[in-house]
């Protein structure tokens, strides 16, 4: 009887599963170059219509959802995109396809998304300038890490709805930030933060609970 072997997972498949993978393979190098070109187009855009910016952002994230038909009135056409994420240039992203921003999200300038694994941001969440989301990491053992020839890995980042991350906040791999959270400027978030709390510091620590009429 012939035994049919199972095909080996690609490096991209291992990356998306949070397993050790090698980033400097032709397919992943090409994926990063594609995203870099899309980010460069977005970052260099000047006096672009809202429609144009939304399309360029979708090019970065490889979102194939078609835009609604264009309206003749510019203000009315802009209004079609009121719920789309608003991202200020410049922005730096590794792959793009792992970044998911909810309705009404605002991302200020100079933000960085290392999207080795999915980075999900809930609706109406606000980012200050220079926020960095790092879903990728490396082995601690330098013999295994081995520079560009060694493997990498990652863990997803999840940020809930209605959050506010101050300027220069860093979020590390595997962190979940609950709904309605505020993270103080300059904080490094290494652990999960429960919904409706303020956290700040390096490493970020919970300071107090937020009183709100929102339902958890």
Image (cartoon, rainbow, N blue to C red):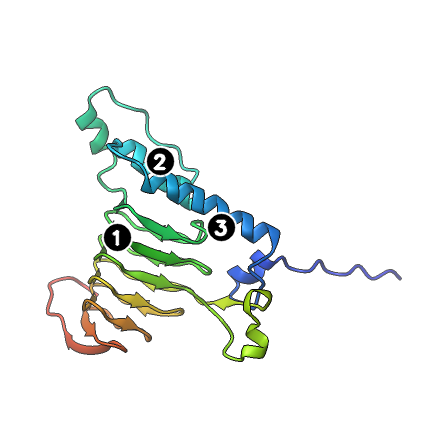
Residue at screen point 35% across, 35% down:
55
In this picture, is 17 found above or below 87? Answer: below
**Based on the displayed image, in which of its 4 quarters is residue 89 positioned?**
top left
Q: Secondary structure at mark 3?
A: helix
The one nearer the camera, 84 or 92, is: 92
| Distance from Cα at disc 3 to Cα at disc 2 | 19 Å
Which residue is pictured at 26% across the width and 34% down the height?
46
Q: Name the one closer to the observer, 131 or 117.
A: 131
Spot occupied by residue 134 in the image (x, y as percentages of width and height): 38, 64
Helix, strand or loop at label 2? It is: helix
User: Measured along the vertical axis of the image, is residue 78 above or below residue 19?
Assistant: above
Q: Is residue 207 left or right of residue 203?
A: left
Which residue is label 2 attached to? Answer: 55
Q: In terms of secondary structure, where does tag 1 sit?
A: loop
Of tags 3 and 1, which is closer to the observer?
Answer: 3
Q: Say which quadrant the C terminus sits in.
A: bottom left
Tell me the tag on residue 32. 3
Residue picked out by circle 1: 123
């Amino acid at each position: 009887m012939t035994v049919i072997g199972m095909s080996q997972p690609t490096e991209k498949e291992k990356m998306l599963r949070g397993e050790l993978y090698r980033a400097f393979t032709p397919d992943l190098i090409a994926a990063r170059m594609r995203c870099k070109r899309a980010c460069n187009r977005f970052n260099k855009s000047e006096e672009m219509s809202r429609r144009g910016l939304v399309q360029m952002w979708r090019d970065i994230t490889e979102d194939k959802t078609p835009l609604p038909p264009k309206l003749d009135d510019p203000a009315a056409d802009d209004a079609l995109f009121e719920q789309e994420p608003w991202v200020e240039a410049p922005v730096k992203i590794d792959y793009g396809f792992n970044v998911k921003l909810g309705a009404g999200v605002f991302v200020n300038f100079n933000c960085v998304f290392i999207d080795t694994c999915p980075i999900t941001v809930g609706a109406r969440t606000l980012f200050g300038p220079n926020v960095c989301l790092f879903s990728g990491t490396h082995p601690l053992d330098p013999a295994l890490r081995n520079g560009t020839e060694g493997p990498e890995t990652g863990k997803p980042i999840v940020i809930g709805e209605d959050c506010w991350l101050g300027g220069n906040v860093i979020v590390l791999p595997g962190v979940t930030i609950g709904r309605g959270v505020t993270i103080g400027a300059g904080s490094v978030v290494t652990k999960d933060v429960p919904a409706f709390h303020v956290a700040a510091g390096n490493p970020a620590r919970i300071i107090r609970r937020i009183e709100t009429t929102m339902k958890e």
